[in-house]
Amino acid sequence: QKEVEQDPGPLSVPEGAIVSLNCTYSNSAFQYFMWYRQYSRKGPELLMYTYSSGNKEDGRFTAQVDKSSKYISLFIRDSQPSDSATYLCAMRINTGNQFYFGTGTSLTVIP
Amino acid sequence: DGGITQSPKYLFRKEGQNVTLSCEQNLNHDAMYWYRQDPGQGLRLIYYSQIVNDFQKGDIAEGYSVSREKKESFPLTVTSAQKNPTAFYLCASSIEASGTGELFFGEGSRLTVL
């Protein structure tokens, strides 16, 4: 079993829709959670960084962490065609020196 | 602006040749990483470095080598021993190797072996 599981999609939504992206994980020691957006042939761009459980909001993006279920989510409100990209989740423990990644979900927002 | 610069963006290599990918950061981060990204496989760790003059192998280090002579620089050499080197290579850095810092990436280098 992989440490981090992420549905690869592809996910296709109309412009203006609310998008929900999710990852599950197996290691209960993970405490720091990240979401990245990656455009084709570009490096991943950090969108959200959260610690432990709870919600964090930044503009149209909301990150949720449910440690009891080992489940994290990224919500995108009022989705735009420019949101079309691959979204990666990542996580780490506070004493470790490595990051653990999902394989990414491909999102297309249709105008 | 602070960030991570990778060069070249695109590189072609003949079989049997070694190539070196450059990574420079001006974020004053201690930890630096090299990942390989292949379609459908996600990111795989090649090497990481927590401090100058020290580095550790990741999950797929065979056929690769690195050096960390300066805090801001972490070049990756893809040697002829790497059997399938065509891939997208990503350099990343974090303020500290063990702790709470998030990971930042460069724009990547695409290596194609002809």
Image (cartoon, rainbow, N blue to C red):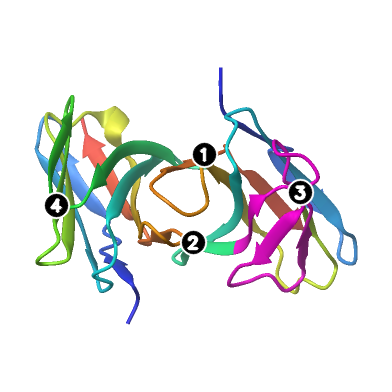
Q: Chain of mark 3?
A: B
- Of A82 and A98, nearer the camera is A98
Circle 4 residue: A53
Position of A1 relative to B25 (above/below): below
For this orientation, the residue located farthest to the top is: B1
Range covered by the magenta-colored residues: B46-75
Which is in the foreground here, disc 3 or disc 1? 3
Judged left or right of residue A69, residue B14 is: right
Q: Residue at x 10, y 67 (%)?
A: A69
| Marks 2 & 4 on one chain | no
* SS for dot 2: loop
Q: Describe the element under mark 3 as helix, strand or loop.
A: loop
Q: Is residue A6 left or right of residue B107?
A: left
Residue A12 appears at what percent x and percent y? 20, 47
Question: What kind of residue is marked 2?
Answer: Pro
Query: Which mark, by number, is residue B39?
Result: 2
As drawn, is B48 to the left or to the right of A102? right
- What's under tag 4, amino acid-wise? Ser
Q: Chain of mark 2?
A: B
Image quarter hosting the C terminus of chain A: top left
Residue on which disc 3 sits: B68
Q: Are the residues tagged 4 and 3 within 8 Å (C-beta)?
A: no
Label 4, label 1: how many angstroms apart (C-alpha)? 30 Å
**Between B60 and A104, which is closer to the camera in this rendering?**
B60
